[in-house]
Amino acid sequence: MVDTLTPEQRRMCMQRIRSKNTKPELIVRSICHRLGYRFRAVRKDLPGTPDIVFSRLRLCIFVHGCFWHRHDRCKYAYIPKSRCDFWNEKFSKNIERDVRAMRDLQALGWKVEVVWECELRDIPVLVLRLKNILHPI
Ligand SMILES: [Zn+2]
């Protein structure tokens, strides 16, 4: 087969594919889907716009990036060495927003779970966790 893409086009193409397939919330959604659960992706009418919403179970899942959402004791939640004030302010705003969203959802009777990006490094363990979240014994 003749490759008709220039190296630049190919690079952009690969990048697009990669960023699409590795988007954490897409992976978590596809696992939930394979487990046979029906859900809605991104409900803007709920506090914090949860990434995955299981209406019947009254359960929301947020898929959080460890860096932006400050995963506690996670190596990906490092603090950049320069412009510390800028980052700290940004981080505290994110945390505040997350806490508020969780509190508001719980006040509305929703259960809230967070899947951290680093959990995607071990898919079998994540699948087990999602099974437990979605089908508690
Ligand atoms: Zn993490």
Image (cartoon, rainbow, N blue to C red):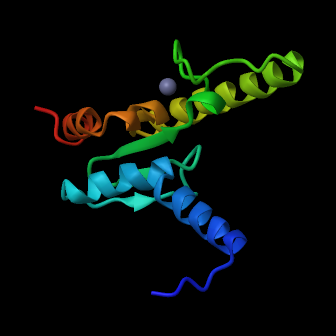
Q: Residue at x 63, y 29 (%)?
A: 67
Between 10 and 98, the residue placed more toward the observer is 10
Q: Position of residue 109 (x, y in %)?
A: 39, 38
Q: Residue furthest front?
A: 2
Q: Is residue 78 shown to the viewer in this render?
A: yes
Q: Residue furthest left?
A: 137
Residue 118, compared with residue 74, is above or below; it is below
Residue 54, compared with residue 20, is above or below; it is above
Q: To which quarter of the image does residue 93 belong?
A: top right
Q: Residue at x 33, y 57 (%)?
A: 30
Image quadrant containing the C terminus: top left
Residue 122, compared with residue 31, is above or below; it is above
Q: Residue furthest top?
A: 73
Q: Position of residue 110 (x, y in %)?
A: 39, 40
Image quadrant containing the N terminus: bottom left
> Left or right: where does residue 108 sit relative to residue 131?
right
Q: Position of residue 102 (x, y in %)?
A: 52, 32
Q: Is residue 112 shown to the viewer in this render?
A: no
Q: Residue at x 65, y 65 (%)?
A: 11
> What number of labels is visible?
0
Q: Position of residue 95 (x, y in %)?
A: 65, 25
Q: Residue at x 67, y 67 (%)?
A: 12
> Left or right: where does residue 113 sit relative to residue 124?
right
> Left or right: where does residue 65 sit relative to residue 126?
right
